[in-house]
Image (spheres, grey):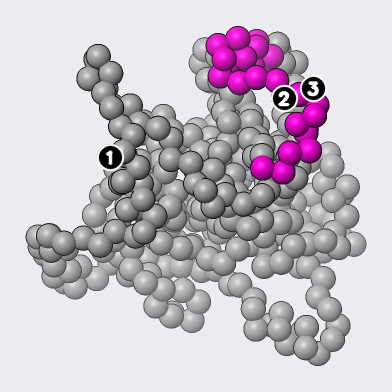
Amino acid sequence: MVTGPHGVQIRARALLDNGSEASFITETLAQLLHLPRQRTHIPLSGLGAAEAGTALNLVQLSLSSIYEPSFCLKFKALVLPRLTNQLPAREIIEMDLSLFSKLQMADPRFYQPETIDLILGADVYGQVVREGLQRFPQRQILAQNTALGWVISGPTKRSESRRSVSSSINSLVSLHCAAAQDLEGALQRFWEVEEIPPSTRTLRPEDERCVQHFKDTHSRDPDGRYIVRLPISSELPVAAEETRRMSLNILASTERRFLREPELAPLYRDFMMVYEELGHMERVPNSHFQVKRAWYLPHHAVIHASSRKIRVVFDASRRTSQQHCLN
């Protein structure tokens, strides 16, 4: 769970990489969290000293755990448009998931390819890992305990055909990143960045639709606050079955947490009852369970470490296998 300076919380997918000298965040997640930016100019290099672009912005954010309420790590991350390909590279369907049934996985869907939102580098790696290793020799898999839950590493099966072996070798992912400061070049580029940008700015078609939507639907209440209708996309795909399965998995994880922390169950139940009484949600009739044009929101509890107050977070940023989400 990552938190911005205004209290915005988003459940993101992170990759632990102690081979990286710095931590990184995607441009998309940085915008969703409304993170203030510090301008920088840091050249990046990867495996084989290959150039990997330049980081122009640095942000600060907080990392928390749904399993360890007292854990809260503030750290800085460089902003990049894209971090890596979806990981894992393909869905791991041959793995016996029951091997990990007794572990609190940091990512219950680790076997599904999804976008990486964060890379936690060597600067925070030592603060995240915890004591505890489990080995699964039959699969050459290692499970490491962390403040965020258990993470696993190891090989996946590959087909024995020549074509499959060649393809898998050509698509291996090796992550390593070094951040280097070129002072003279950075100073020159700093002044270039400080130049007044051109007055014209081209908007994407999606941005233009949002601007027009704001013009058409916004108003102001008696206190002067702006009111605008939510922009509902007409291109939202049919994903009721997949989002329902995702939500049930998160619900099962929450119920397992209640077994470990039984005092949370009544607090969670009371919060949801108040939410329903206020009219923010309503019970769905059984006849609507088969509706395809629906989107199920997973939810989980966030506990304030000092007061032990509970807040239920509805995760509208969780993506499907096709990288669609409501946010």
Q: Image quarter for residue 278?
A: top right
Pick the front one: 195 or 103:
195
Q: Image quarter for residue 285?
A: top right
Q: Which residue is mark 3?
A: 259
Crowdedness near tag 3: few (<14), some (14–19) or many (≥20) residues, C-alpha within 10 Å: few
Among numbered discs 1 and 2, the one appearing first in the sequence? 1
Among numbered discs 1 and 3, the one appearing first in the sequence? 1
Mark 1: which secondary structure?
helix
- Is 286 covered by the magenta stretch? yes
Crowdedness near tag 1: few (<14), some (14–19) or many (≥20) residues, C-alpha within 10 Å: few
Looking at the figure, which quarter contains the N terminus?
Answer: top right
Q: Nearer the viewer, mark 1 or mark 3?
A: 1
Pick the front one: 32 or 261:
32
Give the Cα separation between the discs numbered 1 and 2. 34 Å
* Residue type marked 2: Val
Pick the front one: 319 or 289:
289
Q: Nearer the viewer, mark 1 or mark 2?
A: 1
Q: Which residue is mark 2?
A: 284
**Residue located 72% across and 43% down the image:** 292
Left or right: 307 with respect to 227? right
* Residue type marked 3: Leu
Disc marking residue 215: 1
* Residue type marked 1: Lys
Mark 3: which secondary structure?
helix
Disc marking residue 282: none
Q: Image quarter for residue 90?
A: bottom right
- Is 151 covered by the magenta stretch? no
Pick the front one: 80 or 178:
80
Q: Which residues are magenta?
A: 267-293
Q: Position of residue 222 (x, y in %)?
A: 25, 14
Q: Position of residue 233 (x, y in %)?
A: 49, 46
